[in-house]
Structures are given as structure tokens and as C-alpha cells.
Image: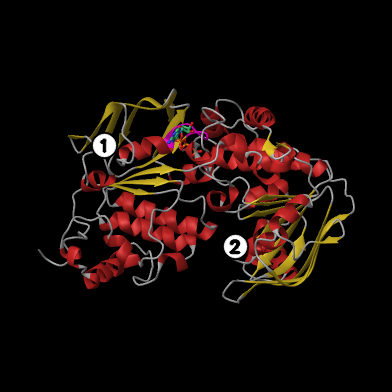
Amino acid sequence: MNQTAAVPAASREPGSGLQLRGITKRFGSLVANDHIDLDIRPGEIHCLLGENGAGKSTLMNVLYGLLQADEGTITVDDAELHLTNPKQAMAAGIGMVHQHFMLVEVFSVAENLMLGREQGPFGTVDMRAARKRVRELSHRYKLEVEPDAIIENLPVGIQQRVEILKALANDAKYLIFDEPTAVLTPQEIDELMAVMQALRDEGRAIVFITHKLREVRAIADRITVIRRGKVVGTADPSMSEAQLAEMMVGRAVSLTVDKQEPTLGDERLQVRDLVVASPAGSVMVDHVDFSVRGGEILCLAGVQGNGQTELAEAVLGTTPVKSGEILIDGKDVARMKPQQTLDAGIGFVPEDRQKDGFVGSFSVAENLVLNHVEDYSRGLALDMKKIRENAEQRVSEFDIRTNGIDLPVSSLSGGNQQKVVLARELSRPLSLLVANQPTRGVDVGAIEFLHERIVAERDQGTAVVIVSTELDEVAALADRIAVMYRGKIVGIVPPETPRDALGLMMAGVPQDEALAAVQEGGRA
Ligand SMILES: Nc1ncnc2c1ncn2[C@@H]1O[C@H](COP(=O)(O)OP(=O)(O)OP(=O)(O)O)[C@@H](O)[C@H]1O
């Protein structure tokens, strides 16, 4: 066997197509996929559109052999498959880039590419061939990545490149991308779209799941819409975002937030000369000053990794403050532990809901009271009746799609998990709400609702800080926008500031220069 055989070259002919027929998948009494038919053709980008919990990931997990369907057939290149694991799917030319990466964090890029392979030269660990293959593939698809880099040291956008390279190393003809753009910066999204188009143009087929309708319109060749486990139709990429949204959730959706001028109260959050360092000692938040009044939403905009997350976590107390002050209603919380800051009236939505937002093995009901269990205790015991009543109420109010409040949160779809976190944080009296990427992975209908809830929280007099890389979200929610770059606030500007100027500030251009450059451009 030659050295590269275990990581084959991109040599397969385009496939003749993939057909799902009558796929049905049940979890107990819940029918997650209900007789789904789907055709995927070589040389197309096929978008799967559907609200949170519609059954998209379940269908893709069936197609990738991670779940077994209760009914239905899968035919790939004219052969019917009986998949019981991903290895078989990979052998049939199906690859998947997951919503939550499946890489081994302590292994290198090249080592990850070798995992899960049949015994071959890599059974005897041919690292040289693996590194060479990483270089070849990353060069060919312009997915630059260092073969010896350790996954846990790589930013999320690069980790995703590794996931894609892994699928390409298997020469997948059918590539599933399950919400790949949710965690990427706008520039990374553009790069990913270009890669998907290049793969399509080579004759590969791509199934693309996203909640961002702009991406669907930009890149889809065909669109299939799924609602409550069933295919409800196909959509045309030339349809407007509003039309696609309506088809997806079955009602008209407002893509903007109806919001009155703020009624400003006292300064509820004051951040003074704040410095926060990473565990390795690099300065992530660099002498930052700002304040937020009650009744006001301040959005922290910026390219991911410019200190926004560390700033938010310092306010909560999960990342230590090096120097400076954080005052909530005049009280310095800068050196408090998270439970104390939560008790001081902070509501917090973390960037990574899986890691920090909930306990996956706990029930939906338990997770909905996680940060304030004392309100649901009687003496030393938990008041289960009260916990259940609260859960029933929140599930209905926030339209959390679950088959029961006693099920573990890990069994919910990604978007519904996010709704659990927001429902919990928005359901108790707050002085300050800090929400990092609050609508990540959430469908357009739910975004409409959550934005309204955040504005309602503001209107009750809470100070709100939103960290978001989505400029649409920033524009919809902000009363003021603070742009961060390399740990500093470049400027604090009003919400009507032109996007181009925000873009320049996000690249580090000072506020005055950015505004002047955009005005200049407008006159030219
Ligand atoms: N392991 C499981 N056990 C029980 N129910 C499950 C399990 N996995 C998924 N479900 C349920 O199946 C339904 C479909 O979930 P799925 O993750 O496929 O939705 P989705 O369309 O991908 O949603 P999202 O856009 O939020 O990611 C949901 O109601 C979910 O709670």
C-alpha cells in the first residue's frame, strides 16, 4: 500500500446523487423526522431551512450514521446503505462538519485527520504522509492550517477548517455542513462560502444548514424547508429574506425590532480603567472605561477575539480582573465570585452555552432555575412543584420545543438550548444583563421574540450589555455601540453610525478617522 492511501487524493468521480426516502426518526413519542424525502444532487449547494427543533440535525445525523432511522431508506450513488456508524458513511463518500466540533483537542491537526481510519499505513503512524496531506489539501482549498498545531490552541475558525479538511481527506462527495457559520466572524464566513462554492464547482454536493437567511440567499442552489419533522416545501433562493422566514416558521416575521427611545436612568454599570489578562498573561482588556445606564442597551461590537468575551466574563467574575473597578449600582463587584455577582443582580448569557450555559445532563426544569436555586428551595429541600411550574411557564412563554421538562437539556436542539439559557436569565429581577451572542443558533422567529424580550428588559430599567459579532443584531438592539479592537474601546458611537465606519473601527481605525473616511467616500 502506498503512503498516501489512507488519506486518499481527491480522486473520486462526482457521485450520481443521494436520496432519502421516508426517513422517520422517533425519540420516544416525539417524531423528530416524519417520512422525509430529500434528493441531493452532485454539484449543488442544498440548504436545509427550518426553525429550531424542526429536525435538521437529526436528519443529518441519520445520514452520517450517528443515528439510525426507524423507517426509510438512504441511497447513495445507486446503492442502498444501511448505516450504523459514521465510518460506513465516510466509506460511502459522506462527510460532516459538525455544529460542535468533533476534534480531539489535545491532538494535532494531522493526528486528527488520521483518526477513525481503517488500519493502513497510519496504523503504523505515518505522520509524514499525514502532514504532507494536510499541506496539500490546505493549499488546494485555501484552508491554511499548520499540520502540527494542537487543536485546543487554535481559534474556532481554524478548528473548523480542520473539520473541513478531515472530510476532504476522506474525499467526501457529499458534504454536510451543520450550522458552520454560527461561530465564525464575517470574514471567516466569506471564506467558508468561497470554499463551499469551490467544492460545489468540483462536482461535490453540499448540504448546508444555517439560520442566517442572507447566507441562504447568497449561496443556495436549492432550498428544502422542514417544519416539525416534515418537509413542507422547497423555496427559491431568489425569494426575499422575509418570504423565506415566513416559509420557515409558518407566519410573518418582523426582521427589525420595534423600539422606542430609551428612558435613561442612573448609571447602573460603571467600568473604570479595567485591565483583564489571559491565563497566559497577555492583556485582553486594556484600560477600558465605560458606563451603562438603566434603560439602555450598549452593544459591544468587534471582531471576535478582541477582548469582548473577557470583558463580559470579568463583569460576571469568571475571569479575574487584574486592575480597575467594576461597579454595579455603585457597588464594586470586580473581585467577586460569579455566584455573588449573580446575587448582586447580574443576568448572564455566556458565549459558549454548551460549556458554561447549562448542565446538559440536568433536566430542562432544573436548568431553568440553575443560577437562583435558593428561590426554589424550602429549607434544605428543593421545591419541585415550584420548579416544575416555573418550567411549564417558561417553556410556553419562550416556545422552547421539548418533549418534556424532565428531559435532559442535552436532548434539545441547539437553538432550544439557547432559549433555555435566555429564559432563565430573563425571568428574574436584574440590575444588569450581560448577553454574549444571545441569539447564536436561534431561528428568525425566535430571534424576533428574544430581541423584543431584551428590549422589554431595558424598558424595565435594566442596564443591558450585548456582545455580538452580528451587525444586524447590533443595529437592531443598540442604543449606543462600543467598538472593541485589541482590548481597547476604539469609540462609542450612536446606532445610526454607517456600517462602513463600524467596519473601519473594528479594524482599529479611530472613531473620527473612520467617520471622516466614510463621509469622504460618500461625497466622492
Ligand atoms: N437524543 C435525543 N433525545 C430526545 N430528543 C431528541 C434527541 N435529539 C433530538 N431530539 C429532539 O428532536 C427534535 C429535533 O431536533 P434537531 O436537533 O434535529 O433540530 P434542529 O432542526 O437541528 O434544530 P436547531 O435549529 O435548533 O439546531 C427536537 O425536538 C429535539 O429535542
Residues at marks 1 and 2 touching, judged by CB atoms closer than 8 Å:
no
Q: Amino acid at mark 2?
A: Val
Whether residue 516 is visible to the viewer of this picture, yes or no, is no
The image quadrant where one finds the N terminus is bottom left
Residue, far left: 1
Q: Main secondary structure of the magenta part?
A: loop
Q: Amino acid at mark 1?
A: Leu
At x 64%, y 43%, the residue is 370
Is 215 placed left or right of 114 in the picture? Answer: right
At x 76%, y 65%, the residue is 334
Label 2 within 8 A of ligand 1 by Cβ? no
Q: Residues within 10 Å of mark 1 (few under 14, many from 20)?
A: many
| CA–CA distance in space, label 1 to label 2 | 38 Å
| Residue situated in front as seen by the camera: 252 or 394 | 394
Q: Position of residue 504 (x, y in %)?
A: 64, 66
- Judging by the rendered image, the residue that carries numbered circle 1 is 18
Q: How is the image coloured?
A: secondary structure
**For residue 387, above or below residue 149:** above
At x 59%, y 62%, the residue is 303
- Judging by the rendered image, the residue that carries numbered circle 2 is 303
Whether residue 2 is visible to the viewer of this picture, yes or no, is yes
